[in-house]
Image (cartoon, coloured by chain):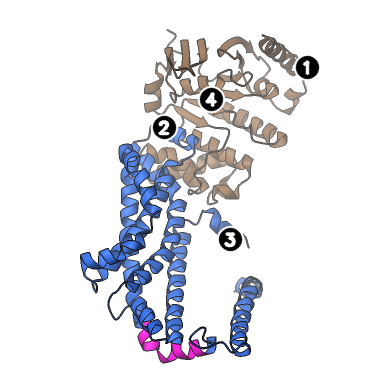
Chain colours: A brown, B blue
Amino acid sequence: MNTSAAVAIEGALKIFNEGAANQVEALQGIDLHIDPGEFISLIGPSGCGKSTLLRLIGDLLEPSGGSVTVAGKPAHQARLDREYGMVFQQATLYEWRSVAKNVQLPLEVMGRNKAEREARADQMLDLVGLTEFKSHYPWQLSGGMQQRVAIARALSFEPSILLMDEPFGALDEMTRERMQAEVLDIWSKTGTTVVFVTHSIPEAVFLSTRVVVMSPRPGRIDAVIDTDLPQPRDEDTRESDRFYAKLTEVREVLRGVQGK
Amino acid sequence: MTTAVAVRPGFLRIAVRRYLPATLIFLGGILLWELMVIVFDIQGFLLPKPSRIASTFVDEFTVVVPAGWFTMKEAMGGFAIGAVAGVLIALTTARWTVVKDGLMPFAIAVNATPIIALAPIMNNWFGIVNPMAKMSIVAIIVFFPVMINMVRGLTEVDPSQLELMQSYASTPRELLFKVRVPNALPFLFSALKVGTTLSVIAAIVSEYFGGSREALGIYISQQAALFHFAEAWAAILVASFSGIVFYLAITLVERIVMPWHSSIRNVAGT
């Protein structure tokens, strides 16, 4: 086993309602190695199991077989050690907590003292540019701002891996592109490993170091495409010929997947 | 200083715009009532004039207000017992789901039965002048909606909020007090607000089955039996005023406890 890997998945499979009439084989024969500091996108049509795979990595679901190793230990231990920052499609802010208190929540659960919590929250809100909104309640923020709070919260305890499940799926296209640039900026500053689930081909290509293309029934990995576009990426990257070439490459693999 | 001066006229105008229609309708209704009684020559024992009720209220002030307070103590005491018990039992079901599965069907069934029918039995159990006889009825009536709503609030949590806490490897205790309980607060307060009204109704109606001579329900039923309808109406005025104050008090607590909730947003926005 490669102990230096941030994530090592070997022969993982997931079956829901095993043995029942409505048994579903969600994932089959998954092998994936992610190096520390990589930005990996999982892309594929609905039902390909990309969110399930993300939850296996995060130990929110248990695999029915195979092994998931994170930071050199079983995924379950990694969760107990607070190695994961999670961001969902909905910002999932706790509406009874102010912005700053939402960012502090994981630190509260981890028993950090008040001074440290406040200092970390200030630092993270500065990172996502929401310092002046720290006393606001979630409903007072736009969708994009809420999602930035969710990212700040996920990073507040410096997890070794950031798991993002279609985090920008509910945002409009303009906000979405701005958030992508911000996430890349944060990624380059923090060096966190990111696993990112998306439906969007341009999003996957723009963000990732590698794109994992998946297909459904049963969910499996069809191809892993290196997106070796130069770093750091910016708005010019989106208009470069190499970006278009990568888009086309991913799109063709996906088309093959859907044709099956 | 300047801001206070600048804010005041706007605040007044908003207050007038908000409350003027209701005030006009209230005064118009009273006036219409007064006129109808005069024009159609309605007998006082059927429907007294508002002016007559008002003067009777002033004359009987030293009787009806203490009677109202006596009954409100029963209502508030029973409310407190029922609400605290409802919350505690609901918290127990969050910890032991078997309690919830065993209890909820019965809670929903009992909640749908007319508990007020137990009033004569409670008079028999506790003694007719013992306030506990009325408080127990109020407590049972308040208990069920509070418990049922609280259980819903503790259970109906957004799944990703639970996943998030799971990803932090939180303890069940933290999940309960940092997520489930705050999530349940809006459910709890809507039950408590319904409970305020129910508790005043329950206290007065259970007094109709007999009770202390100091009680408002006894006063109403005795005055009505003697055809003293202006006195009965004056007492009903006290009852509805007490009910409204009780409701507003709980609403105030709600605003203090949940400044973040959507029911308060509109107020904050204007």
Q: Main secondary structure of the magenta part?
A: helix
Front tag of 3 and 1: 3
Chain identity of mark 3: B
Res. B80 visible in picture: no
What amino acid type should be assigned to the residue bearing mark 3? Ala
Q: Nearer the viewer, residue A37 or A25?
A: A25
Q: Secondary structure at mark 2?
A: helix
Residue type indicated by callout 4: Gly
Pointer 1: what residue? A241
Q: Residue at x 40, y 26 (%)?
A: A79
Q: Secondary structure at mark 1?
A: helix
Q: Amino acid at mark 1?
A: Asp
Quarter of the C terminus of chain B within the rendering? bottom right
Using the image, determine if residue B249 lies above or below residue B101.
Answer: below
The residue identified by callout 3 is B268
User: What SS does tag 3 mark?
Assistant: helix
Numbered badge on residue A191 = 4
Query: Which mark is in front, 2 or 1?
Result: 2
